[in-house]
Structures are given as structure tokens and as C-alpha cells.
Amino acid sequence: MNFQHLTDPDPPEPTEKNRQAVISRAVKLRRRRRLEGGAVVGCCLAVVLGVSLSLQSSVSPSRLFRLGPPYRISVTLSAKLFPLSVYPDALEYPPPVLVGAASDWSGCPSLVGVVASTRPTPNLVARLLDQLGRSKLSAFEASDPSYWPIIVGNGWARFKDLSPGRILIMPAAQSGYVGLLSHCTTATVRHTWVAETCPGPDSVPAPETCDRDPALAGHVFLIDRQGHWLVVFTYP
Amino acid sequence: MGQSPQNFETAFPDLYRRAYSAAFTILGRRAEAEDLAQEALARTYLRWEKVASYATPFVLRVTTNLVIDKLRRHTMARRLFTRPAADEESADRIDLQRALLRLPERQRNVVVLRYVCDLPESEVAIVLGCTIGTVKTHASRGLASLRRTLKPVQFMADQETEKRL
């Protein structure tokens, strides 16, 4: 059977613009999948997590974290692993605004115990991001409660094999993405550091493609609370 | 698989041409074919590490799935707003679309990948996760079904001739 006569006699040639459009579409698709997957799976996981951590808390004191919309759930975590001094409740819930183009919800971190720290080293950031990507529980440990709704929603960033040499660290005020903290206080911005990573979370392409496609770089917002570095937001 | 892994940038032009061509052959509309080719490549890009070694059949499978989804969505609209085909080529394409939608899913996948996308049987087998024998069986049955649907008059004439002989 021959379908040759149905093919386009003058097909368009693939251009650089097409390639850019494909990559941009892929980034949006990944973001949408995270959010959709998160909405469906998030509730189930939260229930499982809540149950398992409640069991853990039956032998040790526990803390109850209430996470705002779109996940109307509570998570009980061990008070030993998540002391109030390092993991105070987020500044406000529900989060006042949608953050970022991806409709990711995030609250503002509480500034209790947050210190104006010196610039974190790339090695420290690489270790923290490794911990963030390892498992859900370690992601909770590596991040501030203001980021937890995203973890519960299963949409948090998992960085793979990140080399410290490819991490650029700057004060949040100097980052082009400082606008993502615009709904928080100026003190939050002052105390936050941004680590720009290449490639970003879940990125398949080689790091050198970041020069051509800046959208592939990842941006991680960090604070230092009582000597504990915590992720407060990631983008994308 | 007959294809060594390469990076997405290098493979992009060829994959885009193949995806566009497959989409256009079935849909016949340039803008939609371009849109589906881009969507298929975006999905491939996200899974590049896993599918790089058999990127062409993978892209074509994603493309044909998207095309079939699109056809299904438009089936009702087409029923409501059917207009006579303007030329023979359009009529052939509409016949092809209807015939494809009538095939069972497995046969349709094999027929499209094998005869519309022109993939070898070995690559069709890889991308559909079955043996070459299964591909041959589905191809043969699908093709027979397609022939009956596409050329009913000719098919009946052939049968009459066979009986006489």
C-alpha cells in the first residue's frame, strides 16, 4: 500500500525557531506534568506520609504542619527530626499569590532564626540539592516548610549529578528571578541567596546547552536558619 | 536498532521532518502537522536519555498517537459538518482517516508505523514492544482490512474474478 501521493510535496524545513519552540514546549510540558501529577498523587502520598509519620510520632513527640491550598492536608512529622527552631511554620498560609509562571504555590518562609549568612559554597549547595532530590523525607529535611506544599504535591525539583563547578551563587537581589519573592518581605529578599545551576532540575541536555537555552538553568532560593541551609523555592 | 545515540540537537532536523511527514500524510493540514510534530518532539526531548537509541521510531509512534487522538476528537465535528472532498487526494485522505479509525489499536499502530511512516519491521517491533512475527501478523491483517475499507468496489471485483478462475 502506497501513501506517497498524500505526502507534502513542499514540506517546511526545520529551523532554529522550530527547535526553540520544541524546547520551550518541553519545559512547559514538564512543568504541567509536575503540577497535574502533583495534584492527583499529592493527596494520596500525603495521606500515606501522614500515616507513616504518625506511626513514627507515636513513639516520639510530633509536630503537625498544616499546608494550605491547593493541598488541604496536614502532615505530621517527628519533632525530633523537624525541630521548631529550624522548621517553624511558614510565614503565612494560604500563600498570598501564585508564584512563577508555572502556577507553583509557595508560601513565604518564616524569618524566625534566619541569619544574614555569608555566601554558601557551591559544595554545600550541591550537597543540599543532592539531599533535596534523594527522597521525599530528605526533601522535607532540606527545605523550609514554605516549600513543603510543592513537595507534598510531588512537584519539587530533583537535581541529578550536579557538579559544584556549575553552580553560581548570588544574593537574591542580584538574581533576575528576584521577582519570585515579590510577595514576601524585603527582609526575606535580603536574607535569601540564589544558586543558579546548569542544567536545571530533571534536565536531559548537556550543561553547555544552558548558554543557548537559558530557560534550562535552575534557580534555587536558599536561607540559613540556625546554621541549617534550607531551600525555600526552586525555579523552574 | 540501527541507530547510534546522538544528541537531540543533531537528531532534531531529521526527527522533525519524519514527524511532520507522518502527521501531514494522515491529516493533510500543514499547520496541524507542524503543531503535532513539535508536540511529539517536545515529549521526546523530555525522555531523550531513555529513547535516544531508538529516537526515530519513538517520535513516529508519539506522532501517530497524537494524530489519532486528534482524528478521534474531530470525528464528531466531521460528522456534523461533512463536506464533499474537493479533489481526489483529499478524498483519499479522508478514506484513509476513516479506515485507520476503524482498525483495532494494535493493527492501526503497526500499519501506520510500517506503511505511513515507512519504518522497517524490526523498528516497529522495538517501539511497540513485540516480536517481528507479531508485527508481520498485525501488518498483514491490518493491511487486508484497510484494503477492504479503502477500495470496497475494487475488492469485490477482485473476489469475483478469483471465483471465476
Image (cartoon, coloured by chain):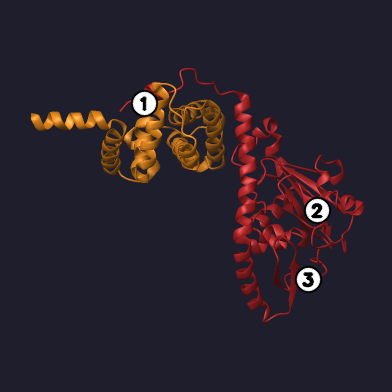
Residue extending farthest to the left is: B165
Q: Residue at x 62, y 24 (%)?
A: A16
Q: Residues within 10 Å of mark 3 (few under 14, many from 20)?
A: few
Looking at the rendered structure, the kind of residue marked 1 is: Phe
Chain given the colour red: A
Residue A195 visible in this rendered orientation of the protein: yes
Per the image, the residue denoted by label 3 is: A83
Residue extending farthest to the top is: A10
Chain of the residue on which disc 1 is drawn: A
Chain given the colour orange: B
Per the image, the residue denoted by label 2 is: A97
Q: Residue at x 44, y 30 (%)?
A: B22
**Mark 1 residue element:** loop
The tag on residue A3 is: 1
**Mark 2 residue element:** loop
Task: Say whether marks 3 and 2 touch (CB < 8 Å).
Answer: no
